Image (cartoon, helix red, strand yellow):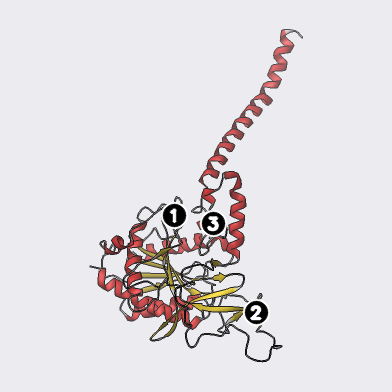
Amino acid sequence: MDREKLKKTLDQLRGPYRTAVCGAAMGLLFTAAALRASALITPESLESAALSSVISKKSGETISAAPAAARPAVQSAIKGIYADEIYFLEDDTPAADTEEPQKEPDDAQETDAPSGDDNSDPLPGYPITPLDLSGHPDSGELILRNNETDYSPDLYALRDAEYPIAAGMDQPRVLILHTHATEAYSDGSGRYGDDTSFRSRDPEKNVIAVGRVIAEELEARGIGCVHCEELHDIGDFYKSYDRSQASILQYLSQYPSIQYVLDVHRDAIVRGENEMIAPTVDTPEGRSAQIMLVMGTDAFGADHPAWEKNLSVACKLETAMNAEYPLARPINLRGASFNEQFRAGSMLVEVGSSGNTLDEAKLAARLFARALADTMERYEK
């Protein structure tokens, strides 16, 4: 081939060659970006997908601890567990295995088969068992359980720390909303079946009704509230936290006086195979569900550097809730932020469990609101 033909051939090949080289370079860049992204996949990145909201993982694995190649499988497993809406209570948990047998309240629902001859059929479905999950704290004791972070905060130092929220004359002071608004409660039968649904869009039956009680109690104490009743979990459920964050930012922009953001949920707890647990405490006003404060951090990469201020508020509130009887379950410290980074008074409030009745949850809401009002009056200066 003479030089002229060779040059012509090279000129013809130059375009495809450049395209191939550019394509390879872009592929390398895309691969590098993908590897970088996989290294950044953490439970915090899944917070918006709501995969880690109110459950503990059976396997104990977290996505940040898994190799990048294994993360999709771990994510899929967590998503599957989340779909069951279950927090699995180990049989040997201190709350369920105390030194003395726990006495159920007098009006507890029976979970055994009715008395009769040996051939009588058992009650259908599975039992719902009332149980005190407070950890039985001594007076003034603070308990932290199911800490999924590497942090070891001094709860007592945080309780004694300066209150991070100043008193304000402007109203409203509190925003109440529900990332998972359709969460609902049991029917009071003491049993549930495979086809039982603990979800409802009816605001008279789900956690919106519980939020209304909190708002009414706070308003009665002169504390202005805004209650967002939007069903953030309708549609793409795994974007619930994205939608509730948008609501939070909207309300904070509209009402800069808001210093407390309460994301009100209900838990779901199963022990063993099918025994559902209803966290319960007897009070002078009747049988109440118990409350759990879920506090977020920056452990999984959230932009939430001041999370200890939120935890300080929670420690003071926890003490107020347990002043007379154990209304509160141990504080739950999580690696994700759960949209708590916008105000120091932000917290996720689990009011009872799916095993509790709505009446028990409403009483818990009233007692919680009183404790919050007491905390605000005592510490805001």
Which dot marks residue 60? 3
User: Looking at the picture, how far across and down is residue 287, in whole percent?
Assistant: 45, 84
Measuring 51% from the left and 45% from the top, which residue is drawn there? 40
Which dot marks residue 271? none
Q: Quadrant of the image for the N terminus?
A: top right
User: Looking at the picture, how far across and down is residue 131, in whole percent?
Assistant: 49, 77
Amino acid bearing label 1: Thr
User: Looking at the picture, how far across and down is residue 279, in whole percent?
Assistant: 48, 75
- Mark 2 lies on a secondary structure that is loop
Callout in the foreground (3, 1): 3
**Residue under pointer 2:** 125
Q: Residue furthest toward the top?
A: 2
**Residue under pointer 1:** 149
| N-term mark: 3 or 1 | 3
User: Looking at the picture, how far across and down is residue 52, in whole percent?
Assistant: 52, 59
Q: Residue furthest toward the left?
A: 381
